């Protein structure tokens, strides 16, 4: 049997099972809406990948497995937002940002109620546009996020193949497949593709921008025409400017870093990218007056504005008991605490559940071990390879590291979700290291580093677990005594 026939058979059987499962809980009309929307969300990334030069049977398998699992998870989330809560597809029961976005789009759609305040209007506007075409339904935006997440995985593979071409001995097909597989293991990253959140749009937009910026790092890429890179860059910036305008700082930072890495070769292309980014994000900032540059600068300065933006919950209290009143510290002190805040940002969310949080939606983001493995390999790169001239990835690898540190500085390391769009970049760095190890370079130092890293990580997690559980237990005992 030919591989494509086998894969197609698996896909048909999988969607048949999904159809049967949805039909058991939803009405026939709702079941058709769920199955058909998920089929489109799954098929478009699959067809896009089939047109790539780095496509392989192994890559098809990776994308099929993660795509079908994500579709099944998305169907579960739709059920949990609706039937499980006694709600409907056109009026689900949502919480937090999901509810804000849904209500914003609904108020714009039918004029019912006051339009809730949101920092960035881009994602709920996309939801509003979908509803104008297809009607109000929670299924359409979640299917869109599933599609965007899968497309992000595909572009990660293409970006890795483009960046690592000639740097390691692996073929483009192997690089793309390995990058897609490792990205698919990032459970927290993948889980956002089934929520009513802007993360999936941010993933795709940032990968589009990064793919265009790679031209600054590798000039032997005649098969990629410059105009298509510019179009891709502009489209990515437009999505980011609408859905998460603050990403403009990270994009401009990356353009500057990569342009200055080789000014003579990159000055024209880099200047063009910088002008495009400043124009698009400048317009984006003008369209979000309530969260404009003035407010963002006040948050960066610290104090009450920063503390109100990143409210500390009970599970974070032990950490902030140690770190102190971080948001009111002067800038130099927050910079001095970067090693601690970065480490906390790296290891959260912790790979254990609190009492009463045993749902699938809470459990999936806490499958952190693949991220710890990828992060450990990337950390080895920064410690042992990055400083060696002509051996590593040059200025490109500096960009995700600085983005990671910037998020840790602003949030005090308390919001891991903000680094999710950058995680595929660390996947690519890990693939580079794996390629070098396959060539027999640095194996002894890598083994020694990973052993030490694993021991430290386990020790830190054990300490964090005991600190957190002790605090939560004492808090529970206090509340019980108050009630008595």
Image: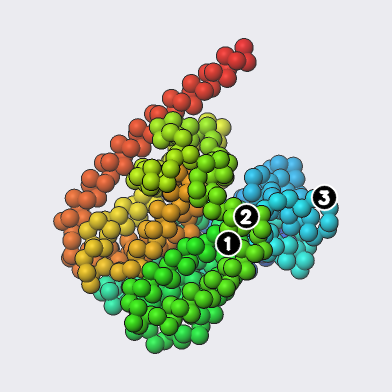
Residue 142 appears left or right of 413: right
- Image coords of residue 396 (percent x, y): 36, 68
- Residue drawn at x 43%, y 33% is 324
Residue corresponding to mark 1: 245
Circle 2 SS class: helix
Q: In terms of image quadrants, where is residue 220? A: bottom left
Q: CA distance from mark 3 to mark 1?
A: 26 Å
Label 1 environment density (alpha carbons within 10 Å; few <14, some 14–19, many ≥20): many
Q: Residue at x 75, y 45 (%)?
A: 87
The answer to whether 133 is drawn above or below residue 23 in the figure is below
Report which residue position mark 2 lands on.
291
Q: Which residue is mark 3?
A: 113
What is the CA distance from the residue labelled 1 to the residue labelled 2? 9 Å
Disc 2 residue crowd, few under 14, some 14–19, many 20+, Cα 10 Å: some
The answer to which quarter of the image holds residue 131 is: bottom right
**Mark found first going from the N terminus, 3 or 1:** 3
**x then y, percent, for residue 117:** 70, 51
Whether residues under marks 2 and 3 lie with C-beta atoms below 8 angstroms apart, the answer is no
- Tag 3, which secondary structure? loop
State how the image is colored. rainbow
């Amino acid at each position: 049997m030919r591989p494509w026939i086998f894969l197609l058979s698996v896909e048909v059987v999988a969607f048949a099972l999904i159809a049967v499962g949805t039909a058991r809980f939803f009405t026939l009309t709702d079941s058709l809406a769920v199955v058909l929307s998920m089929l489109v969300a799954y098929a478009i990334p699959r067809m896009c990948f089939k047109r790539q030069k780095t496509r392989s049977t192994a890559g098809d398998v990776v994308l099929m497995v993660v795509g079908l699992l994500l579709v099944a998870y998305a169907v579960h989330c739709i059920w949990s937002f609706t039937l499980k809560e006694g709600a409907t597809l056109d009026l689900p029961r949502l919480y937090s940002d999901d509810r804000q976005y849904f209500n914003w789009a609904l108020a714009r759609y039918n004029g019912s109620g006051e339009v809730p305040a949101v920092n960035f209007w881009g994602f709920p506007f996309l939801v509003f546009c979908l509803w104008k075409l297809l009607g109000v339904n929670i299924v359409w935006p979640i299917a869109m996020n599933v599609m965007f997440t899968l497309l992000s995985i595909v572009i990660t593979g293409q970006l890795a193949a483009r960046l690592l071409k000639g740097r390691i001995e692996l073929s483009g097909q192997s690089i793309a497949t390995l990058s897609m597989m490792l990205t698919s293991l990032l459970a927290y990253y993948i889980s956002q593709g089934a929520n009513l959140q802007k993360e999936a749009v941010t993933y795709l937009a940032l990968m589009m921008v990064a793919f265009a910026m790679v031209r600054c790092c590798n000039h032997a890429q005649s098969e990629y025409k410059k105009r298509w890179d510019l179009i891709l860059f502009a489209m990515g910036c437009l999505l980011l400017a609408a859905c998460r305008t603050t990403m403009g700082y990270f994009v401009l930072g990356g353009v500057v870093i990569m342009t200055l890495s080789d000014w003579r070769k990159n000055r024209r292309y880099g200047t063009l990218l910088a002008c495009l980014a400043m124009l698009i994000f400048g317009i984006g900032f003008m369209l979000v007056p309530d969260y404009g540059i003035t407010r963002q600068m006040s948050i960066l300065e610290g104090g009450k504005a920063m503390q109100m933006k990143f409210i500390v919950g009970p599970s974070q209290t032990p950490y902030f008991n140690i770190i102190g009143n971080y948001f009111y510290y002067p800038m130099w002190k927050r910079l001095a605490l970067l090693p601690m805040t970065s480490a906390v940002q790296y290891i959260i969310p912790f790979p254990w559940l609190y009492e009463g949080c045993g749902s699938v939606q809470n459990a999936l983001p806490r499958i952190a071990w693949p991220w710890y493995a990828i992060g450990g390999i990337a950390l080895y790169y920064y410690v042992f390879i990055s400083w060696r001239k002509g051996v590593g990835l040059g200025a490109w690898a500096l960009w995700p590291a600085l983005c990671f540190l910037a998020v840790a500085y602003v949030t005090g390391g308390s919001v891991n979700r903000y680094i999710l769009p950058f995680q595929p970049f660390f996947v690519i760095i890990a693939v580079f290291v794996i390629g070098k190890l396959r060539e027999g370079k640095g194996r002894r130092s890598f083994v020694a580093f990973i052993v030490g890293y694993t021991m430290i990580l386990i020790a830190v997690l054990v300490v964090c677990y005991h600190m957190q559980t002790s605090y939560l237990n004492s808090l529970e005992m206090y509340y019980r005594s108050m009630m008595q």
